[in-house]
Image (cartoon, coloured by chain):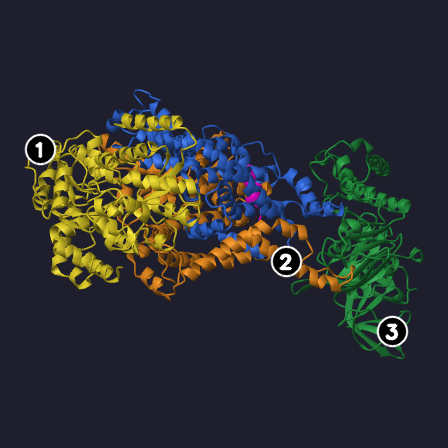
Amino acid sequence: MRYKLLTAALAATVALQFAGPAAATDLEVTHWWTSGGEAAAVAELAKAFDATGNHWVDGAIAGSGGTARPIMISRITGGDPMGATQFNHGRQAEELVQAGLMRDLTDVATKGKWTEVVRPKSLLDSCTIDGKIYCVPVNIHSWQWLWLSNEAFEKAGVPMPKDWNEFVAAAPALEKAGIIPLAVGGQAWQSSGAFDVLLAAVGGTDTFLKVYKDKDAKFAAGPEVAKVFKAADDARKMAKNTNVQDWNQATNLVITGKAGGQIMGDWAQGEFQVAGKTAGKDYTCLPGLGLNEVIATGGDAFYFPVLKDADKSKAQDVLAETLLDPKTQVAFNLKKGSLPVRGDVDLNAANDCMKKGLAILAKGAVIPWTDQLLSQDSQKQKEDLFAEFFAKPELTVEEAQKRFADLIASAD
Amino acid sequence: MSMANTTVQTSTAAGARQDVTEPYGPKPRRMFSRRNIFLYGTLIVVALYYLLPLYVMVVTSLKGMPEIRLGNIFSPPLEITFEPWVKAWATACTGLNCDGLSRGFWNSVRITVPSVLLSIAIASVNGYALANWRFKGADTFFVILIVGAFIPYQVMIYPIVIILREIGLYGSLSGLVIVHSIFGMPILTLLFRNYFSSMPEELFRAARVDGAGFWGIFLRIMLPMSLPIFVVAIILQVTGIWNDFLFGVVYTRPDTYPMTVQLNNIVNSVQGVKEYNVNMAATILTGLVPLIVYFISGKLFVRGIAAGAVKG
Amino acid sequence: MFPALRMQGRERTALTQPADEMSKSERPNPLFRNLNAKVASIPMILTAMVVFVGGTVWTVLYSFTNSKLLPRLNFVGLDQYYRLWATPRWLISIENLLIYGVISLVFSLVIGFLLAALLDQKIRFEDTFRTIFLYPFALSFIVTGLVWQWLLNPDFGIQHVVRDLGWTSFSFDPLYNSSIVIYGISIAALWQGTGLIMCLMLAGLRGIDEDIWKAARVDGIPMWKTYLFIVIPMMRPVFITTLVIIASGIVKVYDLVVAQTSGGPGIASEVPAKYVYDYMFFAQNLGQGFAASTMMLLSVAIVIVPWAYLEFGRRK
Amino acid sequence: MTAANGTSVSIQDLSLNFGVISVLQTLNLDVAEGEFIVLLGPSGCGKSTLLNCIAGLLDISEGRIFIKGKNVTWEEPKDRGIGMVFQSYALYPQMTVEKNLSFGLRVAGIPKDEIGKRIARAAEILQIEPLLQRKPAALSGGQRQRVAIGRALVRDVDVFLFDEPLSNLDAKLRAELRVEIKLLHRKLQNTMIYVTHDQIEAMTLADRIAVMKGGVIQQLDAPQTIYNRPVNRFVAGFLGSPAMNFIDGHLENADGGWRFVADALKIPLGTYDFAGPPVAGPVSFGIRPEHVSLNSGTGWPFSTDAKVEVVEPMGSDTLVWLKLAQQNFSVRVTSERTPKNDEAVTLGFDPMRASLFDTATGTRI
């Protein structure tokens, strides 16, 4: 796989050299997609863009969005903007748009009839501010997946669980077999995300929305949410032996059968794919943890800072179109393990898990995700809380819930 | 033992022969005295502790991944492979760029050389002005500068983004050079000031009577006498700037990323499994320039430090 | 460029007016004295005033606002500070900084001094030993953090190796244990930093007059007492420079934590500088980040400013 | 004295303050053309500070400085027409002797051949020709000091400033160079201002000595005058080795004449030359050890008996310590027969040679 990626990149460079420099405009694109599956997916975008005669200058920043975003924001506010940049769509770039630093893409959108092709509609809504469109959604990422290692369960001699509760019940057997039941990486966003998934799955869609959308602090302190905290308590006990930081290292524990499962977004699928694993045979995926089959419409989007250079602006338009091009969408999302934002593309090549996702999407069982509902500030506080909760057994469930409710009370 | 000591001390005090045996004190001669065993024993144990991480880095970087997964980190490689080094230098990927650290190396050189030159030029003039030309208010500025040494860089990122934007240097190499000069200034100025203060003031006065001005004294009298402190400054700045990550990542763009940023990218761009051998090779490669600088000029460093830090 | 011009301009106008009233042999305007020195100090003055003072004032000002992603002058009084001091992560950060600070300070000085004292015994291979102790200083915190993360990783590192040797209950995983993680980080910090301290101390020891040693020997004072009561007090300037270097490193500790634990497990190894960075950029809450910055600046100021003024502001 | 030639250096109402600390207070000093002035005083008296002010190395707070009639108060050091020699020699370590000598001239842009001529002359006067190509580190202390003087010499200036130039040398070299400086002055006839704390240098070199204390010139006079008629107790005590004897007592008028009384000791002051009309009150009576004689008959206007306490042979002469009115008192004896410890002796002196100081103000009466 890695060789493939290399050749793709090489091919792109070679292609550029023959494309004739006069027409080619270099456009620097920053993103934080650096894991194996992610990089392969980006290569598809770059290939498609280079095919238009322009040149994709890759500005990958390793780490997570937390490392990369400050750099992107500094550059945009510092007057040295890149050609295009990844953000999670939602509220991350809100203020940049308000400050007039981002390009209005309404014209491109009208031409490409985005309002018709992009689904679910909420995706484009989060790109729209004051009736103008400022970003291009490229994929739908849903967090609500439980990835299970078939090998691990075989080894422990327990049947594959069908939902979270069975999984929790199987934990002691896994532990006995020397397997970490649940892999949760050390980075804060992973524990926080796992809790949000539990909230939507164990608590249900209404509970999720009541807490994050309505920001009902009293409800957050109540018994419904207490149930979720109980589940989170199970989760942290199951995860206590995970000694890795990055999410893909945690995924790797599942891939290699060292861990039973992982609560992680659909991007984990890319890792299984890179490792040559087959859904259903080597690993099993349970959307909504098998309890509440919904999909959150979070995801990535590209924003285009305002540039002075007219050629570059033109190239930005081309890139925006390319990103939503059906062919690009398929190629990109297959590699990335995410769902395309167009309803009209052919995804026969998709594997089991992706097809499950597509089916849920078709049913319309979608919920907005925390990126859209909460400010980054509240998100960060939430991360701090759950990072502490997962790492510190002395922090009681009650105490954590109380702090969670306080946080919701002041959230925006 | 104590008897011997007493005798020797008495005789020393009386100014008598000293060649009997050296007493207690900093410099005995016998090879295997208890003291020597203790002294060298301690030094060797401590040295092993300091060398351990480097050893692990080198050894790991020469192993293949299967061996790493099985073996222990301290065992020497069964089969030496240089592939991790080649990969770290030339083909490791971050996102789509698969040219390893090689590009970052030259970027680091391009950033480090002018930054070191400019920051040292400014700081040496500052130190000289503070030590010899104390004009009114100079000490206040200096105190501010020293306090500035304690300000965490993170706090200053935003104001500096604004300043650089206002002067139109954001994202450019000159901008980064200026940032390095600013943050290198406090400690360097302190060193230069101490060094120049320790030079005889009469020398400066003599040069003034001889008619040399501010620049004349600096260039013709002070500079030729300042080699040790310049060595210290160069070492500190080369390592500091070469090793910088924060400014490199915030104030540059991907095509000018320094080596440390690329290192971080390579180490954190986990593609499947962490390739510890490649990471270690990349780590050593990144640290190589400052390490070489240290190994070459370590002796001068201590001498310069003695001149710049000891006198106050 | 902009502020520079403004500053020069102001000085120039101030210069011309009084100069006209005075005859040549009279006292010239004090601004003319040492003019070259002043011109040469412009970079320093600009750095001090625009970057350090200006940046600080700017930061403090905006800490009273509710700025999110971009700075806005929307004042909310002390709200950011109330929130800051009610945040567990901030309190843990402060606690960690104190622990880390005390450890760094005490152990750097003690180890650095002891190593220097050992090297000062006219030993053979002094250069080799010194180079070995000093080389980690050439490595960045990022590199240091990575290596020690690797060494302290229970699955690969020291713990794994010792267990393989047969001691299966051996446990040494400081980076994965909330209650001692900050000590684990200090191990790496000391490894990286003590070499420089040793160098400074060695330089200081070499600056001590040989006669002092002779006098102490004649008086029959044991070596450790000579060090403690005679030599160390004589090395006051070295200790001051060393303190400045160590202390400024302590307040700024950030990369090392990021490279080793990213603040984990949980938030057990968070430090203030990381809180500032995370809230300013990750949480996109500049106001909160600035409030935390201001608290850091304040504590620095309380300790440093009076000392710096006494030490450097006034000369004999 | 050469004062008739006109004033070379003139300092008027000079004050210097460092913050609230006053280092020099409204100081006035006129130095005549070709005169050799020594500024003498204990460390911290402001003598070096004054010299640095004259050189322009320190900015003064008040007052004016003229050199050769030109107001140079705010001139740069190089434009004042001075050359300066420093205690630590202050030779530029990285330059050869020749380059050291020529540095100032090169800075001033003087033509090469002229520089060569001046260096040759200076080297000849100071006899340092063989040293020209050496670096300062390869020179002895005395050679370095010659080079330092040479550096002032080549500047071809009117006024030489010496800042304790001999203090770093050993006693023998110091004596040699002292003579050389004296000869140099005689040869060049330049104005020289010389700072020292060594009274022998002051006495031997100076045309006039300015004794300083606390930033104030206490007395400015020819060496002999300062030695014999010190204007106050400080000057009296500072000059002379061994130091002047002081006996505390009071002045009274008895039997139509003035006399000094301390306990049983009564010294008639018939021959004493009062500085002004005397007034009764507490005074210090001072007399130099060499102005007292031992066991030399009773022909002295004053004589008394005492018992020897300690005898200090000093080579050429001997210092005899005894007690007078319960106060220590020394006598310098040159005769071959020196008294033994505990021997009873008679001492005598002429009060004309004595100095009387008001106990409260310390000024000469």
The residues bearing labels 3 and 2 have C-alpha atoms spaced at a distance of 58 Å
Q: Residue B205, percent across and down?
A: 72, 48
Chain name for mark 1: A
Residue A11 in the figure: left or right of residue A125: right
Q: Have a look at marks 1 and 2 and say if they share a chain.
A: no
Q: Secondary structure at mark 2?
A: helix
Residue ID for mark 1: A154
Q: Secondary structure at mark 3?
A: loop
Q: Look at chain B in the picture and name its colour.
A: blue
Q: Which three-letter amino acid code belongs to the residue tagged 2?
A: Glu
Q: Which mark is residue C11?
A: 2
Q: Look at chain D in the picture and name its colour.
A: green
Near-viewer residue (D270 or B209) = B209
Confirm or deny contact between disc 1 and disc 3 (CB under 8 A): no
Q: Secondary structure at mark 1?
A: helix
Q: Residue D54, percent across and down?
A: 78, 55
**Which stretch appears magenta?**
B302-312
Q: Which three-letter amino acid code belongs to the residue tagged 3?
A: Gly
Does residue B152 show up? Answer: no
